[in-house]
Image (cartoon, helix red, strand yellow):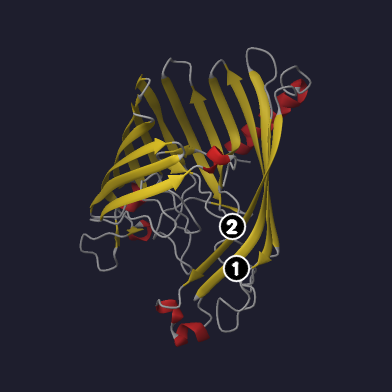
Amino acid sequence: MNKSTLALAVAVGVLAQQAGAAGFIEDSKATLGLRNFYINTDNRDSAAGTTANRNAGVQNKNEEWGQGFDLRFISGYTQGTVGFGIDAIGLLGVRLDSGGGTNGATATSYGGTVFPSKSNGEAVDNFSSLGLTAKAKISQTELKLGTLQPKLPVIVTNDGRLLPQTWQGGQITSGDIKDLTLVGGQIEAVKGRNSSNTEQLSIGGANSPTITGRDSNKFIYGGGDYKITKDLTAQYYYGNLEDFYKQHFLGLVHNWAIGPGVLKSDLRYFNSSDDGANGNTPAYYSSGNYSGAASGRGKVDNNLYSGLFLYTVAGHTFGGGWQYSNGSSDFPWLNQGDGSSNYTITDMQIQKFGRAGEKTWQARYSYDFAKVGLPGA
C-alpha cells in the first residue's frame, strides 16, 4: 500500500466516526453533468491515407460519437477545529458510434481518442471510473488526498473529450494570508480521458507503442497567486516531474475596465530544464530536441514567452496574442500520449504550437451564451 492510499484510508476512517456531525450533510451537494460528444477527424490526405497504410489497418478517418455522464458528490465538513469530508466523482461513457469501417480497410468499430480499445482494437461499448477524495480543513487551509483535477500553470486537467482526465495524489491549498493563495501537491498517477485505468506520468516522446516504461510516479508542484491590487495578480509556480524536467512559471494578469467592457492582459513565462535521467540517459529523452541529435530527441531546454489580450463586453470576447518557444527542445508538460492539456495560450485541439523556435500569433472571438439563457452552450 503506497502512502497516498494509506493516508486516504486513515482519513476515511476518521470521517466515518464523525459523518453524523452537523455541517457534513447540510453543506453537501450532488450534481449530474451530461455531455453528448461527436468528433470526425479526416486524415486521408496525410500519410495515414496511403493505400499501403489503409491495407495495413492504419487509421485514416476517425468518427466517434458518445454520451457521457459525470456524477459528482461534494460533502460539507464535520464540526470542530479540523473539519473532515469526502468527495466522489463517478464517470461513465457510452458508445453510440465509433465509425464502423472508417479506421482501416477491415475496421468495424475501432477505438480512437474518445473510447478505449479492446485487445483486438475494437472500441468498447462503455467505460467508467470512480474517484474518491478525502479532505480536511483548518480555517482557510484545505488538504485533499485521492482523486484530483488541478488546473494550475504547471499542471492542467484535460477535458477535451467525452470524459475528463483525473489524477491521483495529494494537494494543500491555503487562503489564510490576505490576498495570497498558496497551492502545493504531489501527483503519483493519472487516468486518461478515454481510460478506466491509471498509469504513471511521462512526457511527449519518452514512450512509443513499442517501447514503454520510461515514466515517473512523482510530480511535485507548488506556487501561489498574489493580488497586488484588486485588478492585478502576480503568479509563480514550480513543477518537477522526477527524471524528466523542472519548470518555473511567472505570470501577470491585469483587468482594466474600459467603457462598457473589460480588457484582460495575461503575460506568461515558462523556464524548463532537464531533471535526473532526462539529463544523462537517452532512453528518457523527450521529443523535439533540435541541438543536432539525429533522433530529434534530447534533454529538456526551453523558454516560452507569451501575451494574450482579451476585451469582453456583453458576452462577446475579442482577443489577440503572441507566443515564442525558444530553446533546443520543445515546451514540456505532463503528457502520456493519450490526450493532455497545458497552460499555454496556444493549447488548441489541433496543435499546441510549442515546438522549439516556433513563433505564433493569434486572433480569437468567443461568445458566452449564458447571456441569452443558455449556460454551457
Q: Is residue 209 left or right of residue 79?
A: left
Instruction: Give percent across and percent down for residue 141.
Output: 53, 20
> In terms of image quadrants, where is residue 282?
bottom left
Which class describes the residues within 10 Å of circle 2: few (<14), some (14-19), or many (20+)?
A: many
Instruction: Give percent across and percent down for residue 372.
Output: 56, 40
In the displayed structure, 366 sits above or below 49; it is above
Q: Residue at horizontal 57%, vertical 53%?
A: 193
Q: Residue at horizontal 46%, vertical 29%?
A: 183
> In terms of image quadrants, where is residue 66?
bottom right
Residue 84 bears which disc, if any?
A: none
Q: Is residue 171 left or right of residue 267?
A: right
Residue type for callout 1:
Gly
Q: Is residue 149 visible?
A: no
Q: Secondary structure at mark 2?
A: loop
Total label count?
Answer: 2
Which residue ends up furthest to the left in the rendered image?
292
Residue 111 bears which disc, if any?
A: 1
Which residue ends up furthest to the right in the rendered image?
20
In the displayed structure, 10 sits above or below 107; it is above
Nearer to the camera, 233 or 238: 233
Residue type for callout 2:
Asn
In the displayed structure, 148 sits above or below 203; it is above
The quarter of the picture where the N terminus appears is: top right
Q: Is residue 114 left or right of residue 186?
A: right
Which class describes the residues within 10 Å of circle 1: few (<14), some (14-19), or many (20+)?
A: many
The residue wearing badge 2 is: 194
Q: Secondary structure at mark 1?
A: loop
- Give the mark nearest the N terminus, 1 or 2: 1
Q: Residue at horizontal 61%, vertical 24%?
A: 136
Contact (Cβ within 8 Å) of mark 1 with mark 2: yes
